[in-house]
Image: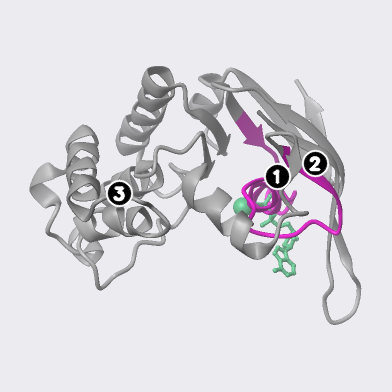
Amino acid sequence: MLEARNIHKTYRQARDPLHVLKGIDLAIQRGEVLGVVGPSGAGKSTLLHILGGLDHPNQGQVIFAKQDIYQWNEQRRSLFRNQKVGFIFQFYHLLPEFSAEENVILPGLVYQDVKKAEIKNRASQLLERVGLQKRARHKPSELSGGEQQRVAIARALINDPEIVFCDEPTGNLDSENGEQIINLLLEFNQRNQQTLVIVTHDESMAERCHRVIHMRDGVLSEK
Ligand SMILES: Nc1ncnc2c1ncn2[C@@H]1O[C@H](COP(=O)(O)OP(=O)(O)OP(=O)(O)O)[C@@H](O)[C@H]1O
Ligand SMILES: [Mg+2]
């Protein structure tokens, strides 16, 4: 459903350019749970951002529905990000001044041609599924790390994306909370056939992926 072809990424810094991705080829199947592992600095987050339409590669293509998403204009690509893709970041990235429920609703209000009441309804269903219906009115600062990550999951799913990118979704959680997040993600994958791409350092998470790819020095290997 999503394919990367010969992706290169170089960060231009003060002195030496940093060649982070050196020709990545990857095909992700619909409904797949793909784990991405590798040492810190290997380029895992960079790859995730490029696959999700958040950052341009210097070379190569990301193919979705037979089209290169980097040939689209910025508006078309924002639509792709909003409607086809969900992102769960390592540090949640919730908006501090909004409640849990408002954080979940917000992406649903952009570009969507549906009534606010419907989105609100969907947000409360999602918050219930992640076990946070009683915390919906709380701001992120009033929630634990695990709770904030569950809000971030609900937010990533509000527009029913086809593919969800998770960048170390359990990186800041203790093993019990981490386990709960893994179970939730896999449950959504099984029920809704949502494709998951999960960057993780967590062995127990990697073990539960359908396939794991290893990233090292800007190239991929499968184990
Ligand atoms: N915006 C940027 N400008 C310059 N260099 C960057 C930028 N973003 C990342 N890098 C560098 O690119 C390399 C890959 O970074 P990336 O965040 O993709 O690694 P990672 O595999 O996700 O690491 P980690 O496991 O620590 O999250 C690192 O050396 C990083 O310092
Ligand atoms: Mg990273």
Identify the residue under disc 2: 216
Please name whichever residue, 73 or 219, is drawn nearer the observer in this view of the structure.
73
- Label located before the other in sequence (3 or 2): 3
**Label tally:** 3
Q: Is residue 7 left or right of residue 213?
A: right
* Marker disc for residue 39: 1
**Which residue is nearer to you in this view: 31 or 181?**
31
The magenta stretch spans residue 46: yes
Residue at the (55%, 36%) spot, across then down:
198
Q: Residue 182: which disc?
A: none
Q: Name the colouring of the figure.
A: one colour
Separation of disc 3 and disc 2 at Cα?
Answer: 43 Å
Distance from mark 1 CB to nearest ligand 1 atom below 8 Å: yes
- Residue at x 73% of width, y 32% of height: 214
CB atoms of marks 2 and 1 within 8 Å: yes
Task: Tell me what residue is drawn at x 84 percent, y 82 percent.
Answer: 14
CB atoms at circles 3 and 2 under 8 Å apart?
no
Q: Would residue 127 be seen by someone viewing this image from the given angle?
A: yes
Q: Residue at x 19, y 37 (%)?
A: 125
* Ligand 1 contact, mark 2 (Cβ < 8 Å): no
Q: From which residue to which does the magenta span run?
A: 35-63
Q: Quadrant of the C terminus?
A: top right
Nearest to N terminus: mark 1 or mark 3: 1
Disc 3 residue type? Val
Q: Element at badge 3?
A: loop
Q: Which residue is mark 3?
A: 114
Vertical position of residue 218 compared to residue 181: above or below: below
**Eyeballing the image, is 86 above or below 209?**
below
Which residue occupies the extreme bottom position in the image?
A: 14
